[in-house]
Image (cartoon, rainbow, N blue to C red):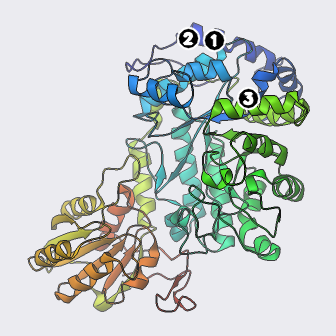
Amino acid sequence: MHDTGTGNTGNTAQPSRRTLLAATAGVTAALAAAGPARAAAPDDSRLRALVSRMTLEEKVGQLFVMRVYGHSATAPDQADIDANLKEIGVRTAAELVAKYRVGGIIYFAWAHNTREPHQIADLSNGIQKASLELPRGLPVLISTDQEHGIVARVGRPATLFPGAMAVGAGGSRSDARTLGRIAGAELRAMGIRQDYSPVADVNVNPANPVIGVRSFGADPRAVSALVAAEVAGYQGSGVAATAKHFPGHGDTNVDSHTGFPTITHSRELWERLDAPPFRAAIAAGIDSIMTAHLMVPALDDSGDPATLSRPILTGILRERLGYDGVVVTDSLGMEGVRTKYGDDRVPVLALKAGVDQLLNPPDLDLAWNAVLTAVREGELTEARLDASILRVLRLKSKLGLFRSPYVGQGGVDRTVGTRAHLAAADRMAERTTTLLVNEGRLLPLSRRRHPKVLVVGADPASPSGTTGPPTGVLAGALGALGFTATALSTGTAPSAATIAKAVAAARDADAVVVATYNVTASSGQKALVEQLVATGRPVVAVAVRNPYDVAQLPSVPACLAAYSWTDVELRAAARVIAGRVKPRGKLPVAVQRADDPEQVLYPIGYGLSY
């Protein structure tokens, strides 16, 4: 049992232990055998009995996973109440659960769900209490997108690890497993039991605007191994992992948030390139798989997105790959799934295709009533709903939500952001930094020869919960390593005046470190690097997102790939620059020549060291 003692952080009224036990008594009794319930082997007959007692409205609700604004289940800030009323028609998370009987809730930083770990635990407990106190109340499956790297909804002081492509550069299955184990333990301590990670997409398109460094790499065998290892880590910690985005989002130049991508792979290429990581996830016992809002004509030529495709979700995923776990849609608010059908048809068609969980519809009332109407009018059978609800309940049972739905503040203190966890993330990041160029053995920089370092470059908005900006983090880390470091932000599109200012500052420095972010041929960032190199000062480029930047920077004497601008990866890059650690990362993707994309400049597996 988890520690059910709770400390009051002032966010929500804390239920007493007696209240918590009473609230769970109904579902616990329904599942209890002669001895304690076994999380790994739920009793289907008892779960089926729970389903049989649900009203149709309750069944429909169990299929939805919904966002909600606020740091508290019952007492959010007024601005969050207003946002909830506008978007969902309820004031609070507790009202959301009571009105729609949703089976899941997804946390976002922008919805103010994830201020800090103790508050997150309180919010989770408040949601569970609100649901379990209802007639026939069930525990709620709370989820989030905690991929690490550039996508993380829970920030500091929780442990933040390198992202997937960085882990791919490290190439260690042990590291991937450790990431999942530690990250899973921290999420579970805060009451989050389902993580929409790992990304199983094989990123073979350098122009991919939505996946990129969120993928482990371009080699399907390497990606498969790391996906399986991360799944084992998460699920060994009692958190459901989610492989995404089926059937594969790695070769697109359209962002499915804002458009409707098409994957032109042949069936044979899909089998060889896109399918292996999902097969590996299924072999590893993955608890859930997320769909992609994109079209794959070789798998289904109807023009429907995969999320709404029965040939893809039932024919391939269920029948061909033999997967019988939970299938969750990507967010139903994304343009890729809304292009062809209205928001009332999308959830119904997704269920007909084989989906179990409907994630974050833009209009919950419309979607919920559309499913309800589809059952009442015979388009969907109640038996079809029951099959999905049973999968969801099996997962809730496996995760221990019927036995122990609440978390305690003691567990947060013992688990989240501990010194050992933070040290593990730092050590992992050191194994991922990749040295691509080092002319004349410029690196590592010497404090004796290069005491004054200017750090310039792109300062994109920091990923959730990191300190930022990148130039400041790099300068601070170099300062801590004995250099006199100054930060000067020049942005992702520096003007001629900004470049001139940076060049003038460089003349007073002994070396320059420039952070680059998705450099293009016509980018001001490219002009910045070229003019800094022209000063004659030693220049070190650090690609803080895609490693492909190096192809646009032929004149730079030293270049590192950090794969993200999170603190943990920037600090590791600084230690590599200073020579405190040797670069050990190897490219998990190929970098093509800028002037001839058919030619490979740096192949998969390339990486220098000292």
In the figure, 127 relative to 501: above or below?
above
**At 55% from the left edge and 74% from the top edge, which residue is drawn?**
588
Q: Amino acid at mark 2?
A: Arg
Mark 2 sits on what residue?
A: 17
Q: Amino acid at mark 3?
A: Asn
Label disc, if present, on residue 369 of the rendered structure: 3
Label disc, if present, on residue 489 of the rendered structure: none
Mark 1 sits on what residue?
A: 21
**At 41% from the left edge and 72% from the top edge, which residue is drawn?**
518
Q: Are marks 2 and 1 in contact (CB under 8 Å)?
A: yes
Q: Quadrant of residue 98?
A: top right
Answer with mark 3 or mark 1, whichever residue precedes in sequence. Answer: 1
The image shows residue 478 at horizontal and vertical percentages of 22, 65
Left or right: residue 95 versus residue 377 is left
- Residues at marks 3 and 2, CA–CA distance in whole angstroms: 36 Å
- Residues at marks 3 and 1, CA–CA distance in whole angstroms: 33 Å
Q: Are marks 3 and 2 in contact (CB under 8 Å)?
A: no
SS at badge 2:
helix
Q: Quadrant of residue 312?
A: bottom right
